Image (cartoon, rainbow, N blue to C red):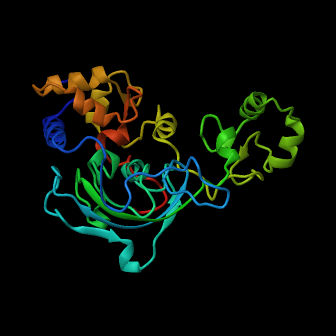
Amino acid sequence: MMKGFSVSNALFLAVLAALAVLSLAAPSEVKVVVYSGPKTCSNKYLKKDEKPTKVEADYVVGLHFTVTVDESTKGSRETLGKKIESSRDAGIAPSFPVGQGKVVAGLDQGLIGLCKGASAYIIVPPHLAYGRMGKPEQGVGSDATLRYDVEIVDIQPPIPDEFFKIDGNKDGRISKEEAKTHFDKLGQALDLDALWKDEDKDGDGFITWEEFSGPKGGEPRAPTQKQQKKQQAGKVPDEMPSFFKGVDTNNDGKLNKEEMAKMFESLGQEMTEEFWAESDPDGDGYITYEEFIGSDNKGAGKGEEL
């Protein structure tokens, strides 16, 4: 048994490993089935006054949706078929920019490419929805696969967002280095001192989304998974249980592939590549504490509840 582990720790990890094996049988990627309306469309040859007909990243989509727990769920199965939420109950079709983390990651992915007027099923696997912890307050259990029944009712072109373009590392603020890099690429001269005097209202050396006076989209974008992991790296919660600390042998607050493999070996099991790919969805080679226990709902955006 691994040093620092108690019997209860080992049992917890055994249960965790068992849940992981179950989740491998669920779909690993988003599946989209258009069952009504147009299946092909293009925004390439639109005239000046014509609206887009195809959903693309950053385009604003208006849609009706009904989300249920899909029958392919391999985690918590007592809620199979349960309706979680529906825009039709409220009679209002919500709208949001696609691909900006306003909804769960799997829905963001599945909407891209759909045509105006199309109806489709979007099947979202757990790691691109609410993960191992689910969302109990909405009736979503552990490792739930979600089924979105969507109807695309409107598509609008992207709202200009210069802030996002200038913010090179996507941390929600612009540094002088990022501004210089951006405008150098455009071949435009820039007086950084004058710009910072006007824009950096609190004088902290950065221009935040709130301070920026140029085009910046409708609202701040949700941090990407990679940015969240960079922010979390090295931040080890004081309440972190001993089992995670036991696996994290180099004490850097995150787990690498070798550490996870050794954990499985201590339980008499072999870690599969599929398990690692699901546990490390952004492919940066590490699993944070929040991802390990599934409490970060890593597939979910911070805005809408979809």
Residue 175, how many percent across, how many down?
Answer: 72, 36
Residue 116, how many percent across, how many down?
Answer: 45, 61
Q: Is residue 119 left or right of residue 301?
A: left
Q: Residue at x 40, y 31 (%)?
A: 253
Q: Residue at x 50, y 34 (%)?
A: 230
Q: Which image quadrant: the N terminus? A: top left
Total number of numbered discs in the rendering: 0
Q: Is residue 167 visible?
A: yes
Q: Residue at x 80, y 45 (%)?
A: 203
Residue 208, how many percent across, how many down?
Answer: 70, 48
Q: Is residue 240 visible?
A: no
Q: Quadrant of residue 64?
A: bottom left
Q: Residue at x 64, y 44 (%)?
A: 164
Q: Quadrant of residue 16?
A: top left
Q: Is residue 206 left or right of residue 159?
A: right
Q: Is residue 96 left or right of residue 142?
A: right
Q: Is residue 59 above or below residue 127?
A: below
Q: Quadrant of residue 20?
A: top left
Residue 77, how many percent across, how many down?
Answer: 14, 58
